[in-house]
Every structure is written in structure tokens, then in C-alpha cells.
Amino acid sequence: MIKRILNYLGWTIVAILLGFLHMRIVLGPGPESDNSGIQFLNGIHDFVLLYVGAIIGCIIAFIFILFDVFYLNNKLQGNNKATLFKFIIIIAIAIIVGFTHYFLENIANVI
């Protein structure tokens, strides 16, 4: 049981890092300037990067864990490349969540 929890904790960390990566791609690099007003904007940029990236990463982790518990565990028992396959699945989920976020924010103008 502890091994399974630690395994899901590792996948959650991977998902949150993928959420940060998605937000880094969406936001781009922060503005760089010596002006103190721009430094405030850098703080806002970093806050949005961490806050929204963590939320998107948690959504990715939640979907992956549900998919793993209800589907992948039964299909991948005894498979040597289960970790690689799970990594590919979590990247695919991250792409789908990232595309959905982009669609809802820019095309449908809901977010």
C-alpha cells in the first residue's frame, strides 16, 4: 500500500512539472527590466506560472490516477515496459489538458 502511494506521489510530481511546463509555454519568459514596476510584474508572472501550473498539474495527475486505477493496472500487470507506457500516457493526458485549456481560454473565451 505504501509503495502504491509513493508511486502515485511520483506520478503526481511528474504531472505538476508538466503543468508548469505547459504554463511556461503559454506565458513565455518573464519580462526583464531594472525598473521596480516591472519587477512587480515579474512577481505576478511567477505567481501565475506557479499557481495555474500547479492547478493544471493536479488536473493531469487526477485524470492519470483515475485512468491508472481503473484501466492501466489491469492491462499492464507483468509488463516490462509499464513505466514507459505510463509516462507516454501521462504526456498524452498533459497534451489533451493543455489543448483543452488553450481552447477554453483563447478560442471559446470561457476562462
Image: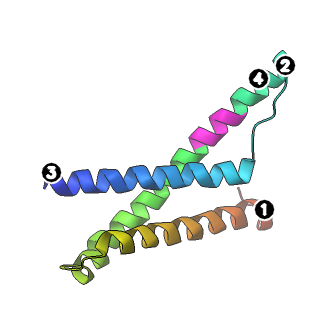
Q: Which residue is mark 4?
A: 40
Q: Kindly indicate the quadrant of the structure image that contains residue 81.
A: bottom left
- Label 4 to label 3, Cα distance in Å? 43 Å
- The image position of residue 110, as x and y in percent, is 72, 60
Residue, disc 3: 2
At mark 2, the secondary structure is loop
Query: Is residue 76 at least partly visible in the picture?
Result: yes
Q: Report the residue at 66% width, 48% height from top.
A: 24
Label 4 sits on a secondary structure element that is helix
Give 82 or 61, whichever is nearer the viewer.
82
Residue assigned mark 1: 106
Q: Residue at x 71, y 31 (%)?
A: 44
- Marks 2/4: CA–CA distance: 11 Å
In the image, taking residue 57 as reference, residue 98 lies left or right, namely: right
Residue 86 magenta-drawn?
Answer: no
The label on residue 34 is: 2
Question: Distance between the Cα atoms at labels 2 and 1?
Answer: 31 Å
- Crowdedness of circle 3 by 10 Å Cα count: few (<14), some, many (20+)? few
Task: Find the magenta span and give its range.
Answer: 45-51
Who comes first in sequence, dot 2 or dot 3? 3
